[in-house]
Image (tube, rainbow, N blue to C red):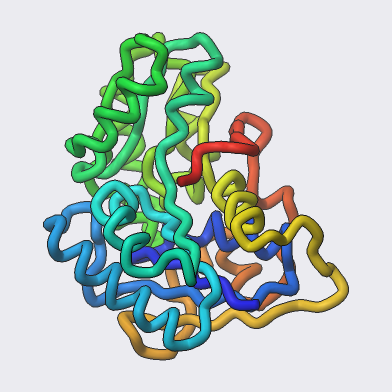
Amino acid sequence: MMVALIDSGLGLLSTTGWLRHLAPDLDLLLLLDPDGAPWGSRTASFVTDRLFAAARSAVERGAEAIVVPCNTATVTAIDALRGSCEPRVPVIGTVPAVKPAAAAGQGIAVWATVRTTASAYQDRLIADFANGRPVARVACPGLAEAIDHGDMAAATEAITDAAERTPRNCRSVVLGCTHYPLVAPEILQYLPTGTTLYDSAEAVARRTLQRLDRTTTSHSTTGSIDVLLSGRPGNLPAGAHAYPVGRALAAAARVPRDILITAATRVPMNEPAI
């Protein structure tokens, strides 16, 4: 069984890692778009076109489910993609973990790309699930791009800037871009002690298995991991090797849990995935 994951860059690594951990027998097809990256600063029509092109390629190669581990692509075009692919091929999207963060009863901030931060979708998500709590919207320009390049100096600069703009009472910080969990330990260094990060990668992976009716998985076999770069066969970009999960996936190994989650990062088990 093949599952395809689509993102412009390395934001798909965390969800891919969880799928590899939970169901190592699955064949995984990773579709990145280096020619069009980053999607976080692109127009809605551009993101939609690139997402649909990748999805068509995935279906042609035999994908039985499509995962969009990208907040920008999800808020921009997930409904249209579902209309095109379902019910034959289930489509699983990703949304920021506002609801579980609100349930913690602390001040909330959402770190996201410029496009996701400005989206009506995020506004609706906050209105529906923040339980009336004020939510600080913190755009993080340049952070996803730095992560894609494995440029930790640039990532640290972007993290420092975002942390300075995050109200000190916000002890629940939602990682509203799927790239950001890759630098969760670095983010925590610049936020007050006791801050909890909320990430949705595990929830999306588990939701994918539910949609495939995979209540049990085989750990006796290891599936393949194939990569397409803007439609061309290739390998994970060099930047992926800056992160433990990227190195594990590049080696086509099973991904251990301890490199997917830090002790101060809360990963909601059941949501948010759509």
Residue lying at the far front in this picture: please name it: 87
- The image position of residue 40, as x and y in percent, is 24, 53
Residue situated in front as seen by the camera: 5 or 111: 5
Which residue is rendered at x = 39% and y = 69% of the image? 85
The front one of 135 and 74 is 74
Which residue sits at x=37%, y=10%?
A: 133
- Relative to 73, 64 lies left or right: right
Q: Which residue is drawn at 29% across and 68% down?
A: 51
Residue at 41% across / 61% down in the picture?
150
> Relative to 22, does residue 258 appear above or below in the rendering?
above
Relative to 104, say whether 226 is above or below: below
Residue 267 visible within the image? no
Query: How many numbered circles are shown?
Result: 0
Quadrant, the N terminus? bottom right
From the top left corner, tell me how far across and down residue 168 is, in percent. 38, 12
Instruction: Please say if 169 is above or below 33.
Output: above
From the viewer's perspective, tell me whether residue 216 is left or right of residue 62.
right
Q: Is 55 displayed left or right of 202 in the figure? A: left
- Is residue 26 visible in the rendered image? The answer is yes
Q: Where is residue 268 in the image (x, y as percent from the top left)?
A: 60, 34
Residue 151 placement (x, y as % from top left): 37, 58
